[in-house]
Amino acid sequence: MIKASEKASKILIRDFGEVEKLQVSLKGPNNFVTNADRKVEKIIIEELEKSKKNFSILTEESGFIKNKDKNNFWIIDPIDGTTNFLNGVPHFCISIALQIEKEIVAGVIYDPIKDEIFYAEKNGGSYLNNKRIRVSKKDNVSNCLYGVNYRKNIPENLIIRHTGSAALDLAYVSCGRFDACLQKNVSLWDIAAGIILIKEAGGIVDNFEFKEFSKISIKASNERINNDLNKKIKIF
């Protein structure tokens, strides 16, 4: 997974440098697809298939690709933060996760511009560029920093950031940059890798129901603020 993301990132960095030349087509409301998406996805799939595991694939661009193993999936988002990418904002990533029997057991989130690679495996801990990471230790909800993708029903006194990348928001919770992440109506490929990162970094992911093909809302935080956050914010 790491090798696949690193190889694909070379295309991503090159195309980001020429973002004004990319051919862009409208895929849906606020959701754009580029040539870069397709090229990155193709490279990732080719690299993952070298593992000869015959897992099926769930990806943002191509949807569900059935292989011999129909119950277990590689979950791929070739560019999470596409709108940032298209507008020259250097905050986007490649996200890859592995789901076995409806459980995310491994994940990689790679930010090619900052050269930051977050990765985790079940019972193996979470890492950022080979260094072990943990969620924050803050215990006061009002003093925390939140990565969110919506504003409604969030108390005015909370400090929030809308970054445009759900995957990186979750990665930032896993290393303590953010104290919590609130994501509403996102897809599995946006959050799959981040879920295992946070869990292995000592955090909590609440109200997550595994849905391969429909929208999901999740809340992730460190353990110390989890209960208070549940009382203050209702997104489910």
Image: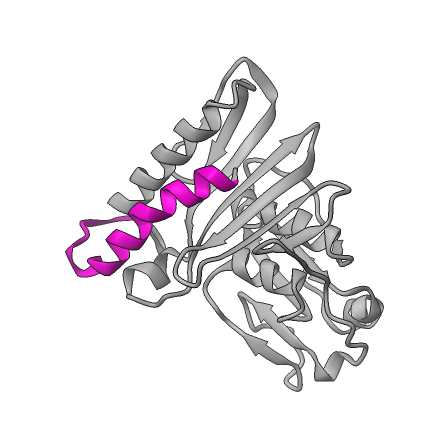
Depicted 168 relative to depicted 196: above or below: below
Q: Which residue is located at x 36 percent, y 34 percent?
A: 43
State the extent of the magenta-drawn residues as a range. 2-27
The image quadrant where one finds the C terminus is bottom right
Q: Is residue 133 left or right of residue 84?
A: right
User: For the view shown, which residue lies furthest in the top direction?
Assistant: 68
Q: Is residue 192 above or below residue 67?
A: below
Q: Residue at position x 64%, y 54% from top?
A: 127
Image position of 125 with respect to 227: above or below: above
Taking 43 as reference, is 68 left or right? Answer: right
Whether residue 209 appears in magenta in the rendering, the answer is: no
Q: Position of residue 27 (x, y in %)?
A: 31, 46
User: Whole-percent x and y of residue 147?
Assistant: 58, 69
Q: Position of residue 231 (x, y in %)?
A: 81, 71
Secondary structure that dominates the magenta span:
helix
Residue 35 appears in which quarter of the rendering? top left
Q: Quadrant of residue 223?
A: bottom right
Q: Is residue 183 left or right of residue 17?
A: right
Residue drawn at the location 69% of the way across and 32% of the way down = 102
Q: Is residue 34 visible?
A: no
- Residue pushed farthest front? 130
- Residue in front for this viewpoint, 126 or 171: 126
**Do we see residue 175 in this rendering?**
yes
Residue 18 lies within the magenta run: yes
Between 87 and 171, the residue placed more toward the observer is 171
Colouring mode (rainbow / by chain / secondary structure / one colour): one colour
Position in image of residue 21 (x %, y %): 15, 56
The residue at 76%/59% (across/down) is: 203
